[in-house]
Amino acid sequence: MRKIDDLSLEELEKALAEIGEPKFKAKQIFDWVHNKTVDDFEGMRNISKKTREELGKIFDFTKASIELKLESKQDETKKYVIMFEDGNVVESVFLKYKFGNTACISSEVGCKMGCLFCASTKNGYVRSLTSAEMLKQIYLIQKDTGEKISNVVIMGSGEPLDNYDNVLRFLRLINHERGQNISMRKITLSTCGIVPRIYNLADEDIPITLAISLHAPTQEKREQILPVAKKYKLPELLKACDYYADKTGRRLTFEYIMIKGFNDSTEDAETLSGLLRNKLANVNLIPCNYVKEAGIRPSENSDIERFKNLLSDKGINATVRRELGSDINAACGQLRNNFLKM
Ligand code: SAH
């Protein structure tokens, strides 16, 4: 059966026309699904019983439930394990920042990218998520916390540009004025650097923030920790980033996880500032999470500060990512992995 929550308003209008219903009803139904976020037809009070029954014959709803929730004692961060109809789980996070309530969502179950430092990829790739499964993570978090989400980061498990069509559909649905109406400017998509898709995204004419998991300042070092770098080399990646910035006028974020003794030297900071000189860019320095299997440890705080100051001296805008919820299995697939082991 078709999932009603995966459809655009236009597709819903078409589907309703096929069962002889007027167009305006599609708007009402879309409002129930994506604004009031009901998950059955019974709740749609302004839709007649007959229409609801007809709809129930051709559509059902994407099902998702919160299987596990961890609440930080240090701040208001909440981490969720969310299960879909087929029993697969992903993790999603609620973060409270001064600028707004943020949901960090997953785009795939597992991941193919194989980055050395990342827990999401350790158990391999299972499947992509549908657009409604991405929406559901946000709708469930809103219901659970009773708070409206204003910002979204696609930085949970999975590589969003590896699930391009569904992610694009998700973006248009979450941004829809009759749905949650979350501004594209308040959405960040993080990618390890699938170059052709960065060009595609630039041409979509949606002003989201693009974050690039750069993590190392040279081709040689990048290859050591991100297998995708072998396929899409650093100069090509930076060229695609320039195209994105030119086309959208948006400042890019370069994420740089700080790994002790690997990418945190003065020389690394200088090479990085050379790469990003004269670019519309922010650098986000992220103390990496400890990954035992890969022997990866976070840089010392003093090294992170020094690195940041070196970048700032060269005129590069750099910030250190504030760690939230570090008492509840930091990020990046660790929680799902622990859940799978239970
Ligand atoms: N696949 C996308 C989005 C998911 S990862 C990407 O690669 O960008 C979201 C961010 O978390 C990425 O920047 C990723 O590199 C980072 N990350 C993964 N493992 C980490 C770890 N052990 N410590 C800190 N950040 C990590």
Image: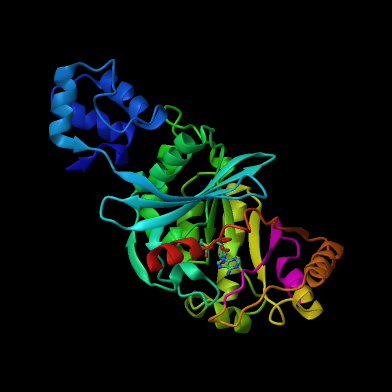
Q: In which quarter of the image is the C terminus?
A: bottom left
Q: In this view, does 34 lie above or below 154?
A: above
**Any magenta on residue 276?**
yes
Q: Position of residue 230 (x, y in %)?
A: 50, 80
Q: Residue at x 79, y 75 (%)?
A: 270
What residue is rendered at 76% in x and 59% in y?
318
Of the pair 340 and 193, the residue shown nearer to us: 340
> Which residue is at the front of the view, 286 or 186?
286
Could you tell me which residue is drawn at 52 percent across and 56 percent down?
155
Which quadrant of the structure image shows residue 45? top left
Image position of 298 (left or right of 181)? right
How is the protein colored in the picture?
Answer: rainbow
The outermost residue toward the right is 313
Pinpoint residue 197: horizontal percent, then vertical percent.
Answer: 45, 61
Residue 263: % across, % down:
70, 78
Q: What stretch is highlighted in magenta?
A: 271-291
Residue 283 percent across, percent down from the top left: 70, 61
